[in-house]
Structures are given as structure tokens and as C-alpha cells.
């Protein structure tokens, strides 16, 4: 089999927005396999016959699933009640159009008063205990304006989600 000629498989760029949209849909985090299952459904009509072939280096993995793993790391940071930053370490940066579509999809799931930003960073440091933190809240517990809808960050068994 060997290495595939350039242009025969779907490139990493095509996976960016579907992966980011899926992460927004599932609350910001999810098992890689589950996220890629959903991305595969979304991209079914875009994938080529070459994308569906097993990798020569790992016959148990289909080529498109490997290509889809473009996001090396991400971290959701809530630095204020009304501001959330998604920090992404990516293999390649998405186009302005792709990024705009993703940001719009994320904002549709957030309260209109919440500021949302995607920040591409070269790396994400480990937390104070030497572990990677997927979600970081810098909001003091119990700090919610009177009448404001309460949003909290729930962390359970390595997964996180925003709840109201």
C-alpha cells in the first residue's frame, strides 16, 4: 500500500469545523472515538474511497479517523462569568471563514451575554498538580450577579460540561 499521493485523501482542513462543532454540541469535551464517530457521520459525503482504507502502519485504523485528529489539545477557560475562551493547540490554523462558522455555532449555544473567543496557542501548560486541565474556571464560586442565570462547571470522571 505505502504512502498515499497528495490530494487523494481528505485533508486536515476539512475536519476542523466538524470537529469543533461536534465538541460544542457535546458540551466542549468528549471521548476521541465518540467525537470522531459523529464527525464521520457529518462528513460521510465528503470522504473519499481512500479515506475509508486502513492505514498501512495500523490496519485497525481507517485513514480518515487518523486524519481527523488535527487538534492536539484544547482547554476551555472561563475567566469571568460572562467570558469563555477555548484555547486550541492545532496542527494547522483554520481559515477565517471556518473559524467564523465555528464561533457562530458556539455562540448559539451560549447565553448572548457571554463573550466567546477561540485562541490558538503553541502549547497548554500543565496545571498546578502536574496534570492537564481540560476546563479551568477562574470564577470565584458563588459569584453570580443577582438574577443572573447560574452556570457552573461540572467535572466528573475526566469529562466536563457546562450546566445551568
Image: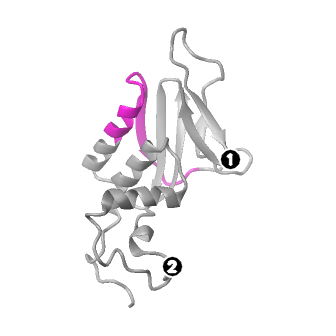
State the SS at label 1: loop
Which residue appears farthest toward the bottom when viewing the image?
1
| Region of the chain picked out in magenta, as a range | 103-124
- Indicate whether 110 appears above or below 100: above
Judged left or right of residue 142, residue 7 is left
For image coordinates 49% across by 84% down, the residue present is: 57
Q: Nearer the viewer, residue 120 or 8?
A: 8
Taking the magenta stretch, the answer to whether it contains residue 8 is no
Image quarter where the N terminus lies is: bottom left
**Which mark is drawn over residue 157?**
1
114 sits to left or right of 138: left
Q: Give the tally of numbered discs.
A: 2
Image quadrant in which the C terminus is located: top right
Outermost residue toward the right in this view: 129
Q: Which mark is residue 102?
A: none
- Give the residue at x 38% y 47%: 21
Q: Which residue is mark 2?
A: 60
Q: Which color scheme does this rendered protein use?
A: one colour
Position of 125 compared to 109: left or right?
right
Label 1 CA crowd tier, 10 Å (few <14, some 14–19, many 20+): few
Viewer-proximal residue among 118 and 27: 27
In the rendered image, the vertical position of residue 49 relative to residue 42, given as above or below:
below
Q: Earlier in the sequence, mark 1 or mark 2?
A: 2
Q: Position of residue 157 (x, y in %)?
A: 68, 47
What is the crowding at mark 2: few (fewer than 14 residues within 10 Å), some, or many (at least 20)? Answer: few
Residue that sits furthest to the top in the current view: 146
| Residue 117, image x, y percentages | 41, 37
Indicate the secondary structure of the residue bearing disc 2: loop
Residue 107 forms part of the magenta stretch? yes
> Residue 105's x, y, as percent?
34, 39
Amino acid at each position: 500500500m505505502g504512502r498515499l499521493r497528495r490530494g487523494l485523501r481528505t485533508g486536515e482542513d476539512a475536519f476542523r469545523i466538524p470537529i469543533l462543532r461536534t465538541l460544542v454540541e457535546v458540551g466542549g469535551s468528549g471521548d476521541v472515538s465518540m467525537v470522531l464517530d459523529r464527525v464521520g457521520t457529518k462528513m460521510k459525503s465528503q470522504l473519499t474511497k481512500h479515506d475509508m482504507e486502513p492505514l498501512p502502519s495500523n490496519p485497525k485504523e481507517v485513514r480518515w479517523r487518523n486524519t481527523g485528529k488535527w487538534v492536539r489539545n484544547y482547554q476551555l477557560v472561563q475567566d469571568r462569568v460572562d467570558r469563555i475562551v477555548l484555547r486550541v493547540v492545532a496542527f494547522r490554523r483554520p481559515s477565517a471563514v471556518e473559524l467564523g462558522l465555528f464561533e457562530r455555532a458556539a455562540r448559539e449555544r451560549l447565553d448572548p451575554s457571554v463573550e466567546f473567543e477561540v485562541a490558538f496557542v503553541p502549547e497548554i501548560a500543565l496545571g498546578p498538580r502536574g496534570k492537564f486541565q481540560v476546563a479551568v474556571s477562574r470564577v470565584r464560586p458563588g459569584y453570580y450577579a443577582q438574577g443572573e442565570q447560574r452556570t457552573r462547571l461540572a467535572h466528573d470522571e475526566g469529562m466536563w460540561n457546562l450546566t445551568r
